[in-house]
Image (cartoon, helix red, strand yellow):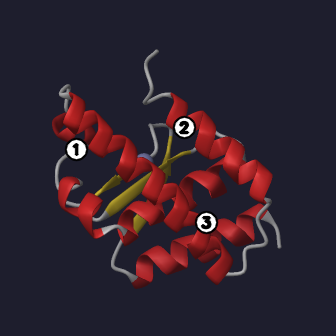
Amino acid sequence: MTDSDRLEALCAWAESKGWHVDFSPHEDEAIGLTRTINIDSRRKPRQQVYALCHECGHVLDDECHRERLLPSEKYYSDTQVGRIAQIECEINAWRRGWSLARRLKLGLDRRGYTRAAVNALSTYIVI
Ligand SMILES: [Zn+2]
């Protein structure tokens, strides 16, 4: 299976849930209000696969889903509780994204996926 097959399978899954996937040169994001996922088209195909798994993970997460009715800059909270909730939501989405990839038999490399998850999660942690 090629990365473009994987992207196609994930897009078909998202469409089946009533979401639309766009590929444009903006940050990756899942927006509940318009049921739109954007995947950053500037990334390499494999990274787009990982990112799309993650965004589909947000679609699968009811708790996050409610929050996602607002664009990210609006739901982002500067309180500690808000930031921890945000990180929890992000970790859950990476987990669910991995389960979805397995269910769709995408044959993804676990180490590569974990590396992408760690890279993305580290941006939420300010030391
Ligand atoms: Zn996320």
The type of residue carrying mark 2 is: Ala
> What crowding class fits label 2: few (fewer than 14 Cα within 10 Å), some (14-19), or many (20 or more)?
some
At a point 53% along the width and 56% down the height, the residue shown is 94
> What crowding class fits label 3: few (fewer than 14 Cα within 10 Å), some (14-19), or many (20 or more)?
many
Split into 4 quadrants, where in the image is the N terminus? bottom right
- In this view, the residue in front, 20 or 121, is 121
Label 2 near ligand 1 (CB < 8 Å): yes
According to the image, label 3 marks what residue?
98
According to the image, label 1 marks what residue?
71
The type of residue carrying mark 3 is: Trp
Q: Residue 56 location, x and y as percent?
A: 46, 65
- Up-down relation of residue 27 to residue 98 (above or below): above
Q: Residue 79 location, x and y as percent?
A: 18, 28
Q: Residue 70 location, x and y as percent?
A: 17, 48
**Could you tell me if residue 98 is visible in this image?**
yes
According to the image, label 2 marks what residue?
120
Which disc number belongs to residue 123?
Answer: none
